[in-house]
Image (cartoon, rainbow, N blue to C red):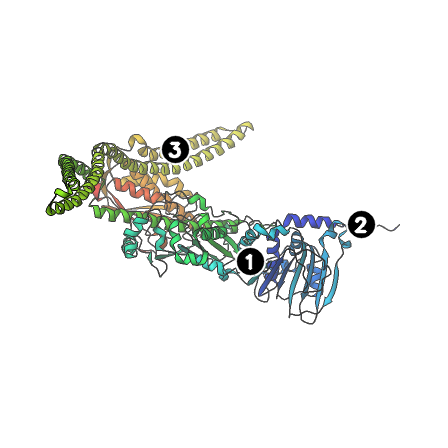
Amino acid sequence: MAKRKHHFDITPHIVKQLGEQLVSDEITALLELIKNSYDADASYVSIEINTSGQYIKEKLFYPNHNGFIVVEDDGFGMSKGTILKSWLVISYSQKRQLKENKKVTPKGRTPLGDKGLGRLSTQRIASICEIFTNKIKAHGTHIAFDWADFEKQKTLSEVRVQSELFLPKTKSGTKLVLSNLNHTEVWEGKNLEKFKGQVLQIISPYKENRPFEVYLKINGTTIDLDKSNEQLRDFAISHFAFDFNGNKLEIKGKTKLSKFIGNSRDDFKNYLEIDNGKKFHEFLQNKYPDINISTAPFFMEFEKVFDINRDIGGLEIFDGERANPGSFNGIIDEFSYDNWMSSDENLKDIFGSLSNYREFAQNQTGIKLFRNGFAVKPFGIDGDDWLRLRESQTYGNSYYPLRPANVLGYFAIDEGKNSELKDKTDREGLVSNPYSRNFFTLAFFIRDEINRYQENIRRTYLEFLKTYKTQNSGIKTVKEAFNQLKETKSKTEEVKTEFRDSVITVEKAIIDSDKIVKSVKTNPLFSTDSEKETAEKVDALLNELKSIQSLLEKLEKVITKTENLNEVIDILEPKIQILEEQLTNFSELAGLGLTAESVSHEFASIADRLAEKASFYSAKMHGKKLNDSDIYVFIEYINSIVNGLKIQLKHLDPTLKYNRERKSSFYISDFFNEEKEYYKNRFDKLSIELNIIKEDDFSITVNKGKLVQIIDNLLNNSEYWLKERKKRESKFNPSITIKIESPWIYLYDNGYGIPTAIEYQLFEPFVTTKPKGEGRGLGLFIVQQLLDSSGCTIALEPTRNEDQRKYIFAINFSNIILTNG
């Protein structure tokens, strides 16, 4: 008896279910079809949507239909054999093999599609799919099928597919006619405006970022993808561009003067607009020499360059090297919707009104991720805040950091250059791997650098206003401000009696003048011409006196308020003093927190080692294999652990609250020898050599806890970046050097040095190139505050290392030096 040949088959219904699960909506479906045109080396794709008509330009197998969508391109088209495989063999994809072999199309494009989703996308849009395609002009292939048949037949091979040859009009290309639309409401009424916005989100509206032309017509209306975007970008108050070439990250930014209008139009007019920002820029450059004057319509600009291996921490290592996501670039434009824009004539000409501009701009906002000009969902689409811009809105003046509703821009990646950044199967995000995680680390780094620039110019503008307002008033310190208030109060007391006498005098003059005028007016026949003329003058004088009386009444209210100035001074003066004390305390406590954090890590490491040993000897004891030698070794180990804990506590002790105000005198070399003992175990594990060079020893009188916190911060920074370099260079021998040369100490390491992009802002708060969670950017700010409270200073030496970076921290102890060593 012959054996029966068994085989698997599949129901057509499964194919429909697969399409519904993999293609979430009409926009995604349309995007897949546009990608097919891109993969076919087309120079354009034309999309026509008609929600109620019938397509009559070609002879169709299904001419009787309601509504249609035509997707047409001039790509290289398909032969009959290709279409039978590419469309009729489910999940077959020639592109998959092309990508795996790192090959490209004749025009050099790496295919975007590789999962065979194009054919499944059509069922999301319409019931009927008809394809006209030709590889040469001599003849083409026309096939058609109805997705409704997939619900009727038992096996996939039974689904009806109609085909015929046709004589094409073009050299090559493909045209899809999708009819009997499933959801016409998507393309009609209010949804039409929403759809237009969605199209601009999935297909890059930036011409420089779009690989080919996309023409779109909906119910007879042509949508211009370029013009509207270009007009909108002209109104940006800030423009940022970034480019990562695989090794270097370049960030550029430009800002208009109008960004500083903010909440105070008067300050802007009086201090910026009056000289077109000239004084402000001079003030700004004294603090940030790398911020330069820009060309119109922008006011100022900056440019920073970072090395991926030397400046950016927290990047994952894969196969012995940093997982490089590949080169990418992008832009971010920032917009304002404040009421001052309503007077902009250009805005009125283009958008008609501020409300129209605001609505149009906010429909486009978001930072998109475009792969070869096509959006990767959900990044920046429908309010998705993948860059976590909302997290940065912590400042009082919230118009300075980037905000989701106020930015429009993109990150541009490429299928070939960024091959490790893979789309998830459902096209909703990127597959999580070391490359994508490093891409996000770089993206967040770009966000933070832009926000740091924004915060720097915000803070400098406020300092500028304070400085110039202070110069105008002659007040330079808080004490002078209070003295001026007291002087104002004193002078008010001096003139108060005279003022009240003046009020009585004016009131009497009004009464007397009124009598004269009334006397003449009531007896006109008995008044001489001279008396009438005098009465007219007195009447005019009377009106002036009444105006003076009204002004005096207002002044009386002001004088009454100045009488309360002493109470205000008595309340504010101690509060200001408390705030100044609290700033000092903050620096000390924050420094203590960072020191304690470092010590806690070491405690945890010691505890882990002790637990491991205890577990080992406990197992020996249960197995009755524990001998006297083991007990002796374990006890010695515990003793070494206890000594280690004592060293940690000894290090932490001077920084505790009860010791913070205690000052002591000691030689700086003795202090560093103690510090060296504390760091020994930690640095030995990392193979970091700590060198102390005593050229000219000296003694200082200072609170030892503060000095511990200062040195901790500096050494912890060195340790972090030396570890980062060691990850990349296995033969690298890290070292830290402390040179004592009265009244200075110089601290430096053999890492990469300080990135030139941040050397001017290094001691500002929140300045760091460490990733979020590994650095707050407060360490050096706190170091500076702690040194300042002790009358000392810290600076970066001008000397540069072999990478042309500053790297030596110099601390001047001259104000607390006791004797030369």
Q: Is residue 690 left or right of residue 232?
A: left
Image disc number at residue 415? 1
Q: Amino acid at mark 3?
A: Leu
Q: Position of residue 251 (x, y in %)?
A: 41, 56
Q: Which mark is residue 645?
A: 3
Cα separation, mark 2 vs mark 3, equals 72 Å
Q: Which mark is residue 6?
A: 2
Q: Of label 2 and label 3, which has the lower sequence position?
A: 2
- The answer to the question of whether label 1 and label 2 lie on touching residues, with beta carbons closer than 8 A, is no
CA gap, disc 3 and disc 1: 54 Å
Q: Residue furthest front?
A: 525
Give me the residue at 14% from left, 46% from top.
Answer: 537
Give the percent coordinates (x, y) of residue 140. Answer: 70, 67
Please give left or right for residue 453 compared with residue 320 in the image. left
Q: Counting residues from the N terminus, which is met first, the one under dot 3 or under dot 1?
A: 1
Q: Is residue 816 visible?
A: yes
Mark 1 or mark 2: which is in front? 1
Residue closest to the eye, 431 or 538: 538
Image location (x, y in percent) of residue 71? 63, 60
Mark 3 lies on a secondary structure that is helix
Decide if residue 821 is in sight here: no
Circle nearer the viewer, 3 or 1: 1
Which circle's residue, 1 or 2, is located before the other in the chain? 2
Task: Decide: few, some or many residues near mark 3? Use Cα within 10 Å; few <14, some 14-19, many ≥20.
Answer: some
Contact (CB < 8 A) between labels 3 and 1?
A: no
